[in-house]
Image: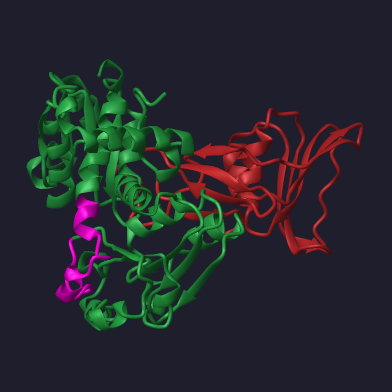
Amino acid sequence: MLKGRNLIDPMDFTIEELVEIFDYAEEIIENPKKFSHVCDGKLLATLFYEPSTRTRLSFEAAMLRLGGEVLGFSEANSSSVAKGESIADTIRTVGCYADIAVMRHPKEGAPRVAAMNSNIPVINAGDGGHQHPTQTLTDLLTIRSVKKELSNLTIGLCGDLKFGRTVHSLIKALSRYENNKFVLISPNELKIPDYIRKVVLEKNNIEYVEVQRLDEVMESLDILYMTRVQRERFFNEEDYIRLKDSYILNAEKMKKAKKDMIVLHPLPRVNEIDYEVDKDERAYYFKQAKYGMYVRMALMAKLLGVDEEC
Amino acid sequence: MLTITSITKGIVIDHIKAGMGIKIFNYLGLDKADYRVALIMNTDSKKLGKKDIIKIENVIDIDYTMLGIIDPNMTIDIIENEVIKEKIKPSLPEMVENIIKCKNPRCVTSIDKYTPHIFYLVDEEKGEYRCKYCDEAYTLGDK
């Protein structure tokens, strides 16, 4: 039962619950019109304590396409947090106005604090460098739709694996499916955090390798997940400049990849995927953004419990 | 040689990591005790090299699991008629609130003072806890 639940961590839902969401998302993709009024009269609060045009628009579009409406703020300065209000008090107040809330916050764990104090469902839309579960749902739905399964895959993750929260969430989520292997491609400074290596990979005996060069592993991959090296996650500018161009995907590297490999990216990209790759039919990152909206539609409908009325 | 007499009825908290005795002394509120209490610091120990001991000549109600958080290796002896009646090894609680402070500067607890610091147990053998909000690890015995 997903009605009334929160989504804070990609592991909050069982595999069966994820299937329920993905099946519903695919129904929406097939016939969006049929679902255009399931959220009539429902209100989504978007609590964005740091800027994120893409994720916010995806959630807003999702709610509007379900027939609901949206209110909220898009930076902390314009909210009551600037006056020193606690997260608990903010969500208690928002719960009086809205039916469901989505929160992005620069501090790790902030959406969990909100969920602990909320009487409406709370969705984590990214908490610092920690988790980004709806991006994970997006990634899983894209992979499932293209590859027809979420098992038996070799997944390459490239770029900023240290601060890239989408990467952490995706590794956790894909670790639950059988026979998946991970190829972790990053400079030494941006390797995955210890807790992902120990608690997720090693504890569950999942096969993984850590390498520093993208071109030498291209041919082994079923999925290549590219990430951006984010300026805001660095404490100093020098490190950012030194590392930002380390891992760029171009047409030359794509020649080495399997014919049915797909390239994913949480977007926005800066320069880590060359524009010439966009023409390659294996480039899935823009289609992925569309899957993101559909999976958010399915998620919100399920958490609000309106899906049964359809 | 410093001599402290044995107690007739009470509690001896032994094998405390040197330096941690004062923390336990304060946690138990023994500075306000109106019965005989001894805090022995940096005494010789075969196992630890140096250790602290607390002797309490009274039977008081102690939350042993919370003591385990401060130092999981300590032992608690219940004394009656000058002999050890019971030896207790503290076990670790599944979850602790406002005992361990999260040191991750990116954690929400670093800015939201109304949020309690909550850690959950992930590995009892290693005494490893993780922050409920940001997954930051904390191993008991770390200062």
Extreme-left residue of the structure:
A78
The quadrant of the image that shows the N terminus of chain A is: top left
Please state the horizontal and vertical placement of residue A302, each as a whole percent of the image. 31, 27
Chain letter matching colour red: B
- Left or right: B109 with respect to A69? right
Chain letter matching colour green: A
In the image, residue B19 lies in the stretch drawn in magenta: no
Q: What is the quadrant of residue A125 in the picture?
A: top left
Extreme-front residue of the structure:
A259
Point 30% across, 77% down: residue: A254
Viewer-proximal residue among A69 and B61: A69
Please state the horizontal and vertical placement of residue B102, each as a whole percent of the image. 43, 51
Extreme-top residue of the structure:
A309
The quadrant of the image that shows the C terminus of chain A is: top left
Viewer-proximal residue among B45 and A117: A117
Please state the horizontal and vertical placement of residue A5, each as a whole percent of the image. 36, 28
Q: What is the quadrant of residue A74 in the picture?
A: top left
Viewer-proximal residue among B139 and A56: A56
In the image, residue A286 lies in the stretch drawn in magenta: yes
User: Please, is residue A155 above or below residue A63 in the view?
Assistant: below
Q: Is residue B135 visible?
A: no
User: Please, is residue A77 above or below residue A225 in the view?
Assistant: above
Segment colored magenta: A268-289
- Left or right: A95 with respect to A119? left
Viewer-proximal residue among A69 and A215: A215
User: Please, is residue A10 above or below residue A255 in the view?
Assistant: above
Point 24% across, 25% down: residue: A92
Q: Is residue A153 visible?
A: yes
